[in-house]
Structure formats: structure tokens, C-alpha cells
Amino acid sequence: MALRVATSRAVAAASRRSAYAFVRQSNVAPRCVPALSVSSPVLGNQTFPRNGSSSFMSTDSLEAVPPPAEKVVLPPMVYIAGEEMTHYASDLIVDHWIKPYFDTSAWEYFDLSCKARDESDDKVLSDAVEAGARIGAIFKEPTITPSASQVKEFGLSKAFGSPNGAMRRGWNGITISRDTIHIEGVELGYKNPVLFERHAVGGEYGAGWNEVGKGTLLTTYIPDDGSAPFVVDKRDLTDDHNVAVVYHNPYDNVADLAHLFFKRCLEANVTPYIVTKKTVFKWQEGFWATMKEIFDKEYKEDFLKAGLLERSGGELQHLISDAATMQLIRWTDGGFGMAAHNYDGDMLTDQIAQVHRSPGFITSNLVGMADDGRIIKEFEASHGTVSDLWHDHLAGKETSLNPLGMVEALIGAMNHSANLALETNPNDEETKEMHAKVMTYTSTLRLALHNTFRYGQGTRDMTGPEGYTTEDFIRKVAWRLGRYLAQQEEEAPPPVLEEPDRTYRRNYDVDHTALRKLFEKYEDGSGKLEYKKFAKMLTKMGVAPEKAGISQGEEKLDEVKNV
């Protein structure tokens, strides 16, 4: 069966039908949810009891809708596996939500667990970075950056650093986009979207440092062009114990960040703000100056037309980072975006996550640029591996992990992968069909996921102690996804239609007597030129002779039907 491209009306209809079924059932007493039977490479054949907990169901049937016989072949994508609870849940999601509908054989998998990094002496990380630069679309599960105690616990040869720095360097990172995730009909921290761009490079995260005693510290710059070196900073250290830290902020790609930020704010219909501490940290002035120049020259007029600068006095407004901290608490209506340096962006987006609900309710997407100008995007959740639930799982206890942030990341990576394939082969029919099916699927998956929360069938962080376990929730979404997709299926794709006959138009007024004389003038008797095609061509070009004195709505002669 062919998966039809769903219109927003079709998806909304699916939602309404499910909502109607739920309303019908809400008039009866809640019933216990049956035990969950799951068969997968990860779970095997297992039953997960609900411990007597009850919840409304949207229909009376829990039977899964059979997946299509023919799977859609997905384009290449890099899949980076992590570990602990989020890896366990991601495996279930791929097995039960993705693989029933798609052939993922073109995906390239890399295991960035601590054990795999140790066994390969971190070659797996460099391989993943190379693949990401080559393919351009990456999904990453949360990973562990081992502490000293974890090095001993995991039996590692050394403490491996965070893979994020290597990825940002290898993919020429521009920004880390972190946005609030919203579920229509579910009240969260911010009522409307909040966007954030965090400069992906520079600052404290790339700092060099050392512990030193009394003495003089010189920071010397040696230009590549052979000109004379000069001292950037000189200071006398008088304490016996000091920590000397050196870092820099690369600004070449701030212009790229500006364009990405302002375009996204326009698309999301939010007001942009730039955040720095430039009143004290004078070196941050260049960040603001570049953003302001590009905004005024290329975007201000569009923002004014859209009415998006009313709350900021008609200008791009600068916020001191201290003030931004306070506004994030006050502006709970949302509808704004912020851009900041690397460290400030990290701290402020943590605050956004807490206001909105938790790190599981914001995205984290690294945007970089390949050497040939292609946009590279890596998508991941903003939270970690959820170690506490993993330890519960290993102990045989029930867990209830909310996978919302990871699913948004997977959707983003799949969409970007499909977009890159379409950009490469814009006229290829198979690629266009694949792209349409991926977009239909991901929008339907998001709807199924969100509606499961809305029906009170969410994980326990959303619905309380009666909420679904990790495994129950994944199966429930899989069931609803199957139903929604089945409502979009047809036995065969609709036919490709030629342009409708122009005689169908109300104001069709071609003089076929004159047109036939014209045809006879140019027809050479070979039969190669047919009158019907000749009439259609001239009519389409707008040069066919017209009848004189025919008013709109007047009946046409029978000869019109011969075209």
C-alpha cells in the first residue's frame, strides 16, 4: 500500500476521530490497561504488568495496525548511540516506531559508549565526526563523559573528554539551537515558543589553563602573516596559588549565526534579543556589533512589517546577561528569541529548560557548515543519559522515561536528511516521493506522541504515579501512530493528471471556425499535426482566435466539444 502525503486537514481529522473516541469513553468508569506484550530484538518476548494502574484509552482496541508491506528506503543519516536509559529507550523507539515503516540500511551507526571509545582508543569518535561531515544529518543519543569514579567503575583506560567539542570543531559549528517544545493543549512553562542560539565555539569550553605560583604571565600573539608579535596581556601574579586561564572567541562565523537566528525568529514569529556582558567584558562588543549591523541592513524592515519589534521599542534590543536571567523568569508568555556567546548560552538555556519544565522539553541542535557550504545539522536531546532510571531498570524496577526530547531530535534528523537528499536530486521522482513520505510520517509521529500525552496516557512525569512505564508508553504511541498512518493509506497513489481541458473554463471563447482555417493553412497533409493538439497549443499560448461579441456565460457552439 502506498503512503499518501497527509494534508494538515487529514492529520487534523485523524486527531478529531481519536478525540471523539476518547470523549465517548470518558463517560464510563476507567478500566485497567492490559499487560503489555512486546517482542523486539531489545525486549524479547516479555510482559510488562501495569500493577493495577488504570487510565483512559482512546479506543477499545489495543491491536496494532499492521505496517505497510513495502518500506520506504531512507537516505543516509549518521546515528550516534549512547548508553544507559536513553539508549535503551532509543532502541525501543527505533524498533517500534521507525523500522516497521522504513528501511534504515543507509544509516551509518557509531557506538559512542564509554566502552566503545575505550576499546577503539576514541577512533570511533573521529569516524563519527568524519561521517557527519560527509553526510550532513546526524542524530545523537545522550552520551557519558566519564568522571574519575566512572573511569574506575567502567574499567576504562583513561577519562575520555566530551565528544561535543570534537563534533563542533569537525563540523565547523556555528550555533547550538535550543528551543522550547510545545504540546498543543498541554500547559507548560512558556505559552509560546522561545528560541535560543548559543554560539557553538570559543569561550571557556576551549580554554587552556594551568596552576601556577608567583610570577609574570604573558599572553603573546604571533600573527600568521609574519608581522611582529605583540603582547595581548601581561600581569604580575602575587599569590602562591593561581590558576591561569586563556581562551578566545572566534568571530568569523558570527555573521552566519546572525542570519540563522534572524531567519528562524521571523519563521517562528518571535522578537529577537542579543545577550552579552559587553559593559564589563569589552571584548564581547564585536558580537553585538556584527549582529546589529546585519539585522539593520537585512532584516529590520521584515520584522517591523511583521509587528515583531513592538515589545522591543522598534529596534533590535541588547540585553545584559544579568537582565536576560530575570526576563526569562518574567516573560512566561514566550514569543521571543535570544542569541548569546557559548557560556552564557549554556547557562541561560538551562534556565529556560527549568522554567519550561525540564531539559526534556527543549531541543538541542548543532548547526555547522561543510567546506562546500552545505549545512550540517546534529540533533540531540538536551538531557543526559538518565542514570537514576537506568539503575532502577537494572534492578528490575519499573521506569517511566519521557522520550519527548529524543523523539524531537530524531524527527529533526530524519527531516534534515530527507531535505538534503531532495536538494541533491530535486528532479528525481523517487527522491521527491521519499521526501514527501518522510515529512508525512514525522508530522504524524509528532501528532501521535503529543496526543498520547493529551489523552492522559503519558509518562509519570506528566500524568503522576498512574502514568505509563517506559515500555507501555512506547507501545501506546506505536499503536496510535499505526492508526493515524493507516488513515492516510490508499491502495494506489493517485494518478498524475494532465492539465484540465481549457474548454472547462466559463470564459472559453475560441472561434473554432477561424482556428480550423488556420490549421488547414499550416497542415501539410502528412498527418503529423493533429487539429486537437494544434488547438490546445494555441489556446494555451493565448493566441487562438476568439469569437466576436460573445459575452461571459453565453453558451458555446457544439464545435467546442471537438477540441
Image (tube, grey):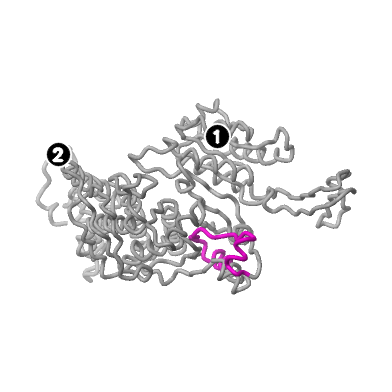
Against 181, residue 487 (above or below) is: below
Label 1: which secondary element = helix
Quadrant assignment, res 487? bottom left
Work out whether mark 1 precedes mark 2 in sequence or the reverse, and give the earlier one.
1
- Answer whether labels 1 and 2 touch (C-beta < 8 Å): no
The crowd level at tag 2 (other Cα within 10 Å; few <14, some 14-19, many 20+) is few
Q: Give the labeled residue for mark 1.
A: 300
Residue at image coords 41%, 38%: 188
The x and y percentages for residue 303 are 50, 34
Residue at image coords 54%, 46%: 260
**Residue flagged by tag 1: what amino acid is it?**
Lys
The x and y percentages for residue 488 are 24, 56
Label 2: which secondary element = loop
Query: Which range of residues does the magenta coloring cover?
Result: 128-156
Q: Give the labeled residue for mark 2.
A: 553
Q: Which of 165 and 309 lies nearest the eye of the viewer?
A: 165
- Mark 1–mark 2 Cα distance, whole angstroms, equals 49 Å
The disc label shown at residue 9, or none = none
Q: Which of 306 and 127 lies nearest the eye of the viewer?
A: 127
- Inspect the magenta stretch and tell me whether residue 390 lies in it: no
Q: Is residue 510 left or right of residue 392?
A: left
The x and y percentages for residue 266 are 48, 39
Residue at image coords 37%, 45%: 462
